[in-house]
Image (spheres, helix red, strand yellow):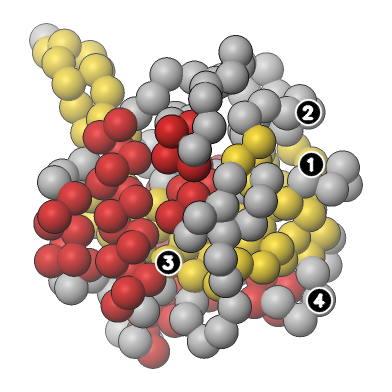
Amino acid sequence: MSQPLIGVTTYLDRARWGVWDMPAALLPARYPRYVREGGGLAVMLPPDAPSAAAAVLARLDGLVVAGGADVEPVRYGAEPGPRTGPPARERDAWELALIEAALASGTPLLGVCRGMQLLNVALGGTLTQHLDGHMGEVGVMGRHTVKPVPGTRYGTLAPEATEVPAYHHQAVDRLGAGLVASAHAEDGTVEAVELAGPSWALGVQWHPEMGEDFRVVRGLVTAAVRG
């Protein structure tokens, strides 16, 4: 199987390294490792002009929208709640444009945590701005069990209940157009969504890159190879 080129979106934040302290495009090293373990070649996609999204997607075989900051509530018609974090407007605009370009072109797409939430918002869905019990301490991944929905794409990739690493306090509320829930937590929270039909578009609410289960990314890479 040839190795497809998989783009992974990045943070845009201030960082320090060596003698430098300046804005930087950041990506935890677990993401490119995750793509490599799935059989793909990873390339970082820092925030850019939304108008460039279609041209970028034309050069890629697949897309991973990484985790990160809360989605700004204005994107789904809501006011920010007291527990909602500061916006990352450049990321929101860029990643929504990438998602829309991927859906339009049929480019296989995997949304991770924030990426799943953005996929839902891109299709007209809404988010719950705060819930408890889905992360560890500050800066520490929690773990909980997700149960797949039989017959879904995710349920085919991972047919059994699985313990996953998670770090989120927001979640899907109303599903976006064309999306179906394909996994749930024990408390009923939607933990995976996917686009109904032949297009390969899947979002997971946990952080699979932090674990050792590569079935989801292998599904993405297989879809990317098939085109």
Q: Nearer the viewer, mark 1 or mark 2?
A: 2
* Residue, disc 3: 109
* Residue, disc 4: 150
> Where, by quadrant of the figure, is residue 108 drawn?
bottom left
Q: From mark 1 to mark 3, how far is it between C-alphas?
A: 24 Å
Q: Nearer the viewer, mark 1 or mark 3?
A: 3
At 30% across and 38% down in the image, what residue appears? Answer: 91
At 19% across and 50% down in the image, what residue appears? Answer: 50
Q: Describe residue 60's horizontal placement relative to residue 174 as left or right.
A: left
Q: From mark 2 to mark 4, how far is it between C-alphas?
A: 25 Å
* Residue, disc 2: 133
Residue 77: horizontal and vertical position, in percent? 49, 38
Q: From mark 3 to mark 2, how far is it between C-alphas?
A: 27 Å
Q: Amino acid at mark 3?
A: Leu
User: In terms of secondary structure, where does tag 4 sit?
Assistant: loop
At 53% across and 32% down in the image, what residue appears? Answer: 78
Residues tagged 2 and 4 counted as in contact (Cβ below 8 A): no
Camera-nearest residue between 212 and 125: 125
Q: Amino acid at mark 2?
A: Gly
User: In terms of secondary structure, where does tag 2 sit?
Assistant: loop
User: In terms of secondary structure, where does tag 3 sit?
Assistant: strand
Q: Describe residue 30's horizontal placement relative to residue 3 as left or right.
A: right
> Where, by quadrant of the figure, is residue 103 drawn?
bottom left
Q: Report the disc number at residue 26.
A: none
Q: Describe residue 192's horizontal placement relative to residue 201 as left or right.
A: right
